[in-house]
Image (cartoon, grey):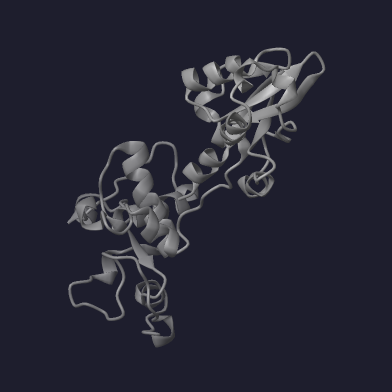
Amino acid sequence: FLKEKNPNIKIWGVDTYGSVFKKYHETGIFDENEIYPYITEGIGEDILPKNVNFDVIDGFVKVTDKDGAVFTRKLAEQEGVFVGNSAGSAISAVLQLKEHFKPEDVVVVLFHDHGSRYVGKIFNDDWMRNRGFLDEKATIALDLVKNRINKPLISARTEELVSHAIERMRKYDISQIPVEDNSGFVGSIDESDLFRLYFEDKNIADKPIKEIMRSAFPIVKKETSIDKISNLIDKENKAVLVDLGDGKYQVITKYDVISAIR
């Protein structure tokens, strides 16, 4: 019908790897070697259905399972279009065909599948991850502190009293505090140390911080991987400091690392 109205219209079919359509359309050969399992739903076949009219189709584009799934999610996340697996494959196919289009061409993409059928699949991170479809960039130090990157670092000075550090820990609900003097970071305080020291000396709160502090937290660059950071946090180092540049620092704790695990 469309070609009757306009012979210049080109119709492209979308096929998946494991389906026979593309090769059959191009060669007229039904090649069983083209048939193998695939994940994409809504397109492709290992048979030639009688309702397919290959004569009106100008060409086929093959799309991988991964690309179909990834672009299905992109349609929802970036365009607000909640459609199914075949729709993502169609968009991926259009992008493969972009060199065929002229600026004045009108491209129409037909979506025939709804996203509600894929909530437990394509829109499920675990499902995508288990199939290697979810490209996740490695988590780095900057990612762990992104929510407080513009907030001032909570620290203490060596000449302050332990009570000052305790007050700050209560106020900001934190468990570790880096300790500074004029030369930079020289020590640290951890709540577990305060707990232990209190039972050794009930007057610990009135002592200078420099008398009870432990060694300074290791300092890492903002590009440091989460794997390296996790190796630095142990019984001796309760946290690390990330150098954000321009004299800014933030603390990364064990809780930050655990919170980033998916």
Residue 183 location (% of width, % of height): 82, 17
Q: Spot the residue most to the right.
A: 183
* Quarter of the image with the N terminus in it: bottom left
Of 177 and 62, which appears nearest the observer? 177
Name above or below for residue 80 compared with residue 30: above
Name above or below for residue 167 compared with residue 57: above
Of 29 and 146, which appears nearest the observer? 146
Mark count: 0
Residue found at x 28% / y 70%: 54
Residue found at x 77% / y 16%: 181
Of 38 and 21, which appears nearest the observer? 38
Of 29 and 247, which appears nearest the observer? 247
Name above or below for residue 186 compared with residue 77: above
Tell me the quarter of the picture where residue 202 sits: top right
Name above or below for residue 212 compared with residue 128: above
Residue found at x 63% / y 39%: 238
Question: Is 100 positioned to the left or the right of 187 in the image?
Answer: left
Residue 63, visible in the rendered structure: no
Residue 8 location (% of width, % of height): 32, 51
Question: Is 63 positioned to the left or the right of 85 in the image?
Answer: right
Tell me the quarter of the picture where residue 165 sits: top right
Residue 222, visible in the rendered structure: yes
Residue 17 location (% of width, % of height): 42, 71
Residue 11 location (% of width, % of height): 31, 57
Residue found at x 38% / y 64%: 60
